[in-house]
Amino acid sequence: MNEHDTPHKVVVIGGGYAGTVAANHLRMRTDIDITLVNPRPEFVDRVRLHQFVAGTGDATIDYGTLLGEGIRLVVDSATRIDTAARTVRLASGRTLDYDHVIYAVGSTAAIPSVTGAAEFAFPLAEFESAQRLRARLDELPLDAPVTVVGGGPTGIETAAELAEQGRTVTLVCGATLMPALSVSGRRYVADCLSRHGVAVLEGDVVTEVRPDAVVFADGVARPSALTIWTTGFGVPQLAAESGLRTDALGRLLTDETLTSIDDDRIVATGDAAAPSGQPLRMSCQGAGPLGAQAANTVLSHIAGTEPAMLDLALTGACVSLGRRVGIRQLARKDDTAVNLYIGGRMGARIKEVTCKVAVWKIRREARKPGSLIWPKGGPRPARPTSAAPVVASS
C-alpha cells in the first residue's frame, strides 16, 4: 500500500466461525484496516461445547493462532451501529470508525417460555453457560437424574456424552428425534442412545421446570437433579437496536449478496444473516463459506464491482454419539436427507475430522487469504422477497 493511500476501515463484529474467516479473507487486499470485535479474548469452538461440559474436550482456542497478521482484536461488545456517523459503539464507551461493517454476531440460546426453564434449566449455546453447567455437573453424584430437553444435534450429543460417562440421562425430544435425519438415520441414533442407557422420549413436551423435576403436558413430574435446555436459538438484537431491518428472530435482512437492505456498507454473515428473508440452517458447515462470501462482498463494494450472489450447498449433518460412535447423514445439495448414512466408529471419525477441519480452514485462511472453497449449487430464491417478516426498529 502506498504511504499516501488511506486504508479502508472494516469492522467485523463477532469472532465466531464466520467472523474469523471473514476477517482473514479480507486480507486479500493489503489496503484494508481490519478490526475484529469480540466479547471474549478467546475463540469459542461451539461444536465442542458438549465435550467441554462433559470434561472430554476443550472448547476455546487462542485467537493468536487463528487470525492473520495485521488484524486487530478488540475484546469488547458492540452496543450500536451508528450508520449516520459510520461508527460502532462499544460497551466500554469506545467508538470505532468504519467504512464497512461485517455483521457476524452469531446466535445465542433462546429465552425459554416454559415455566421455570429460565430460572432452573441450564442452556448450552454459549461458553459462559457451558461453564456454569460444567460446574453444576461437578457437584452432582454420578447417579443423579439428568434431563436434556431438545432432540436436535446439541441435545443428542450432550445426552450421549454424559450417558457414556455413566450418568442417568433422559432426552426429551418434544416431537421427533432430530427430524433432519433420514428415517433410518433417526433409528440408528435412537438405538445408539438406548445402548448408552439414555431414555429417549419422543412426543413428550416439558411444560414446567422445577429445581428437582420436570413436568410434562399430562401433569406427570419426573425427578431431574439437573435440566439442560438445548432447544431454540436466538440472535443478538444489535441490528434491530441500530435501526436496521431484521426478520422476526432479529437476523439482519440482506439481499443475496449478504448486503443489508438498508445500508450497503453493512454486510451480514453466519447465524445472524437472513438473505432474502430466508436464512440458511444454523451450522458450522455454512459459517465459514458465509464468512468468505461476506468478505468477498465487501471487497467488491470497495472495488466498485458487482458482488456475487450467495451460492452455498449444505449437504447433511454430523452428530457425535459419545467419543467412539457417530453418524454422518448424507443429503442432497438442498440439505434434504437421503436414505444413506455412515455410522459407528467411522461416523465418529468423520465427525471429529469435520470439527478439526472447521478450525483448520480458519487457520489456512489466515495463512493464505482466499483459499477457502465450499460446495455450491444450493437452491436460493431468485431475488429478495418483500414478504419477509420485518421487525420495526427505532
Image: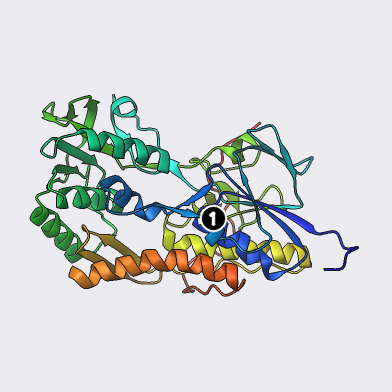
Q: Considering the image in quadrants, where does the C terminus appear?
A: top right
Above or below residue 325? Residue 85 is above
Residue 354 vs residue 72: left or right? left
Q: Amino acid at mark 1?
A: Tyr
Q: Considering the image in quadrants, where does the N terminus appear?
A: bottom right
> On the image, which quarter does residue 90 sit in?
top right
Q: In front here: 300 or 78?
A: 78
Above or below residue 128? Residue 292 is below
Q: How is the image coloured?
A: rainbow
Residue 86, position as x, y percentages in the image? 76, 44
> Badge 1: few (under 14), some or many (20 or more) residues near its Cα, within 10 Å?
some
**Quick check: can you spot residue 257?**
no
Residue 281, position as x, y percentages in the image? 42, 56
Q: Residue at position x 65%, y 63% from top? A: 69
Q: In front here: 101 or 77?
A: 77
Residue 222 vs residue 343: left or right? left
Q: Which residue is mark 1?
A: 63
Q: In front here: 379 or 257?
A: 257
Residue 293 vs residue 199: left or right? right
Q: Residue at position x 62%, y 71% from top? A: 369
Residue 168, position as x, y percentages in the image? 12, 42
> On the image, which quarter does residue 337 sit in?
bottom left
Residue 9 vs residue 252: left or right? right
Q: In front here: 122 or 64?
A: 64
Q: Residue at position x 75%, y 69% from top? A: 305
Residue 16, position as x, y percentages in the image? 51, 53
Q: Secondary structure at mark 1?
A: helix
Above or below residue 378? Residue 243 is above
Count of numbered badges drawn on the protein: 1
**Quick check: can you spot residue 38?**
yes
